Image (tube, grey):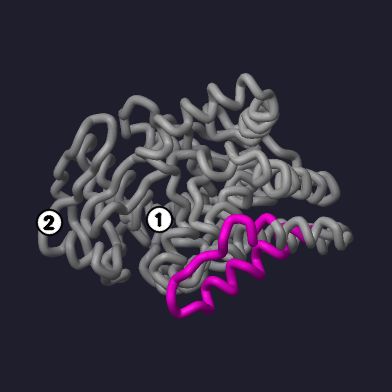
Amino acid sequence: MKVSVLGAGAIGSMFGGLLQQQSRDLEVLLVTRGEHGKTLSQRGVIELAGPWGKQSVPIKNTQDVAAIAGSDYVLMTVKSQGTEDAIRAAEPYLGNATVVSIQNGINDHLLLKYVAPDHLVMGMTATNVALLTPGEVSLQLDGFTIFGPAAGCSMGQHVTQATNLLKRIRVVGLKFLAHPNALGMRYNKLTINALGYASCLSASNFITECLCHTTWRRAVGRPIVEECLRVYEAAQIELEPVPGRSDLARLQRLMRMLERPVMRGVISFWARQIYKRRPIVFSLYQDLLHGKTTEVEHINAEVVRLSRMAGIAAPINQEIVRMVHELESRSNNTFFDRQEVIDRLQAEQRAV
């Protein structure tokens, strides 16, 4: 069985590498680009770091999308902003392959233009993987990866079969699940990303410097979540709990606990021990750091798009989109000061 990973950055390289390492009957092909791809081609192996330590896994790599021809599965792990270009380039070589999207954002409408509904599986992952250096990826945070049908489509065997493929990965903490309302889980995850992307505006540690920072949490964190939930209710999006740690309800409970003085000290100490050493690294931060276009149009701007369809406002997410685009336009890769982020987002709330 041939499995190709289209856009194998952090997540794609980790999942593809683990599939190849644990399933010798699979032919796994990473389709990469840039220095990461060049390094993989030179070495012929992918370096995987995680609870297991470090492993070097021999794996095939290419920068030629035509090489996916003959695949049974194509894992789509391209950054959201590159979705349509990538699937358009891949379409002539897909054949009868099932396309499995493991991306941030809501990209169903783009993929359905090129892939039949019964050959498209939409997924989201609550894991966090960092591309440390070209050729090496590290599992920063484990969790569930959820699969389901595209928006407006029905659950079918293609979803179950794709989930079973990923279940070949047997690593403690990594779990794979099929669910009919995966869309609700994806909006759940999108909200966490929308919140996390606000921390990227000041290059701040999401946990220790934002959620555990009282002013940021009250002026930025909680209002972002509340705005997202208002929009989903108006747009009739039914959120679904995400199993494990990376669930919006659990994040809300954490923010409420941080309002209690005694708990604040305990949680902040615990967070510093864990997340200063292994911070949650958002793809938006990595893109800004390297002067690339980000996927904010598929995360915070998705909330804005839904709000307009529902006839209500989403000024906080709209301002985050504007601020990200400001950072994208800078030539020196600098970020906002954390207080400036607080002040600008508070101003948007007062203006409503």
| Whole-percent x, y for residue 174 in the image | 39, 31
Q: Give whichever of discs 1 and 2 has the lower sequence position.
A: 2
Which is the main secondary structure of the residues drawn in magenta?
helix
Task: Tell me the magenta residue range.
Answer: 314-342
* Left or right of residue 112, residue 79 in this image: left
Tag shown at residue 97: 1
Q: Is residue 239 above or below residue 334?
A: above
Which of the numbered marks, if any, corresponds to residue 44?
A: 2
Q: Secondary structure at mark 1?
A: loop
**What percent of the width, then of the height, locates residue 138?**
30, 44
Q: In the orientation shown, which residue stands out farthest toward the top?
A: 262
**Amino acid tagged 1:** Ala
Label 2: few (<14), some (14–19) or many (≥20) C-alpha neighbours in 10 Å: some
Q: Is residue 255 magenta?
A: no
Residue at image location 17% in from the left, 63% down from the top: 39
What residue type is disc 2 on?
Gly
Q: Residue at x 64, y 36 (%)?
A: 248
**What is the crowding at mark 1: few (fewer than 14 residues within 10 Å), some, or many (at least 20)?**
many
Q: Is 315 included in the stretch rendered in magenta? A: yes
Q: Position of residue 304 (x, y in %)?
A: 74, 61
